[in-house]
Image (cartoon, rainbow, N blue to C red):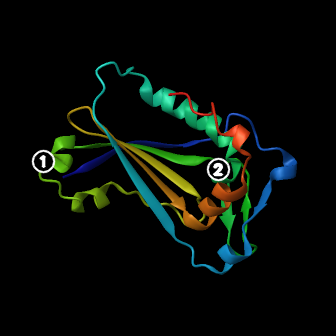
Amino acid sequence: MKFHKQSGKFIKPLVPTPSNLKHYKIGFIDELAPLRHVAIVLFFTKNPNQDPKFVVQLEKSLEKVLTRLYPLTGRYVEESHIVDCNDEGVEFIQAKVNIKLEDILGLHVDVRPVDEFTVETKPQHILTIQLTTFECGGVALVGNIKDNIKRNIQVGMFPPSHIGGVIEV
């Protein structure tokens, strides 16, 4: 199995973070916990009705979501335990792999190759996303997020009324 990175760029929020939200302090317990990243890999088969511009749609949806999840686009400052919400963006990588999705998710599932799809996140970055396309047209969407920040965002980032209607794919 060989991966070929096609492109990489930073996706920024659609609307800049307001100046009063530029510094996001993580919780006390998370300050004490070791920094680690958690990856999730989602596999999707080829959709015959898939718009050929779905990557552009994915990027635009991400821009909208990042407006509300603004700490994800910042950089973690370990000395002060804050996220500098500077809107530098989330790294978005596109890649191809020389196998079919069925080769790893067929009848005889072997989960060991799944680790190959995870992507490294630079220490100061909060989130990195990689979209990998298989020979068959299926895709793997990988998100690698700094766990200490993820917990803070999950717990108190925004009220339930903001959850609906954010993602348009």
Give the residue displayed 52% in from the left and 62% down from the top: 122
Give the residue displayed 70% in from the left and 48% down from the top: 70
Query: Dot 2 surroundings within 10 Å: few (below 14), some, or many (20 or more)?
Result: many
How far from the left and from the top, in percent, is residue 123?
A: 55, 67
Residue 114 sits above or below residue 132 on the image: below
Position of 25 with respect to 168 (left or right) is right
Q: Disc 2 or disc 1, which is closer to the eye?
A: 1
Residue on which disc 1 sits: 107
Give the residue displayed 63% in from the left and 56% down from the top: 154
Query: Dot 1 surroundings within 10 Å: few (below 14), some, or many (20 or more)?
Result: few
Q: Please give the label number shown on residue 73.
A: 2
Q: Secondary structure at mark 2?
A: helix
Residue 14 sits above or below residue 79 on the image: above
Position of 89 with respect to 15 (left or right) is left
- Circle nearer the N terminus (2, 1): 2
Q: Write down the quadrant of residue 141 in the picture.
A: top left
How far from the left and from the top, in percent, is residue 24?
A: 76, 60
Q: Please give the label number shown on residue 130.
A: none
Give the CA distance from mark 2 to mark 1: 39 Å
